[in-house]
Image: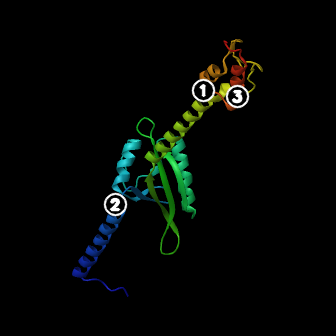
Amino acid sequence: MMQLLSHEEALNELDRHKKQILHLRSILESPHGIIIFSLDTDYRYTSFAKVHARTMKDIWGVSIDVGTCMLDVILDDADRQKAKENFDAALSGEHLIRHEEYGDAKLRRTFWENRYSPMFDDMGTIIGLTVFVTDITEQRQAEEKLRSVQEELRINLESQIRHLKGIIPICSYCKKIRNDEKSWQQLESYISEHSDALFSHGLCPDCLDEQMQLLMALPSDH
């Protein structure tokens, strides 16, 4: 037979449960940079951190409360379907991590790392799911910027070297190059126009010997 609590014992038990709830609420709100919320098997909120409520207002323009169906406040059809598939996977017992984009394009689209997990009761029955969410928008934007810079550098490099590819018609005697206008151009001038190379002039040992021999072969003035 269940023993009835006295009035004082009942008040003490109520106070203990209240402190437990407040403690759990503090745990829910404590992580920095991480959003936590939980849903039941009908996708209705059972708990959420305050920052999650602010985020839903920010990216969807909606207010949420315990009991609100999350699918009803995801206003983009593709985002709603994507979220439902993830929720259903967690409710079937899966643990999954997804990198996803959510939000109204007219308000704010953001990138998230979402960790979905099933939630069990004492009997091992799935009664809902939890989601741990990290905002990775700045990281994704930095990655996109890096890819853009790399692509720009690639295009610039290809632009600089593309005219030096293929067969270049060059005179076998004077070494002039026939350009796109079908006129003959000095080798140094052609390469300078089609690249960042600069030239300085000198004599190689073979040419120096040849020029010296020619000078020595010239008739003297006396």
Asked if one can make out residue 102 in the rendered structure from this viewpoint, the answer is no
Q: Secondary structure at mark 1?
A: loop
Alpha carbon distance from label 2 to label 3: 85 Å
Residue 218: give x, y in percent of width and height.
71, 16
Q: Nearer the viewer, mark 2 or mark 1?
A: 1
The residue type indicated by label 2 comes to Glu
Residue at coordinates 66% horizontally, 18% vertically from top-left? 186
- On screen, 91 above or below 194? below
Residue found farthest to the front: 222
The number of numbered badges drawn on the structure is 3
The amino acid type of the residue labelled 1 equals: Ser
Quickly name the residue at label 3: 209
Please say which color scheme the image uses: rainbow
**Mark 3 and mark 2 in contact (Cβ < 8 Å)?**
no
Percent across and percent down for residue 160 are: 60, 28
Q: Position of residue 215 (x, y in %)?
A: 69, 20
Residue kind at label 3, given as amino acid type? Asp
Disc 2 target residue: 29
Residue 150's disc is: none
Residue 82 position (above or below residue 3): above
Residue 192 location, x and y as percent?
60, 23
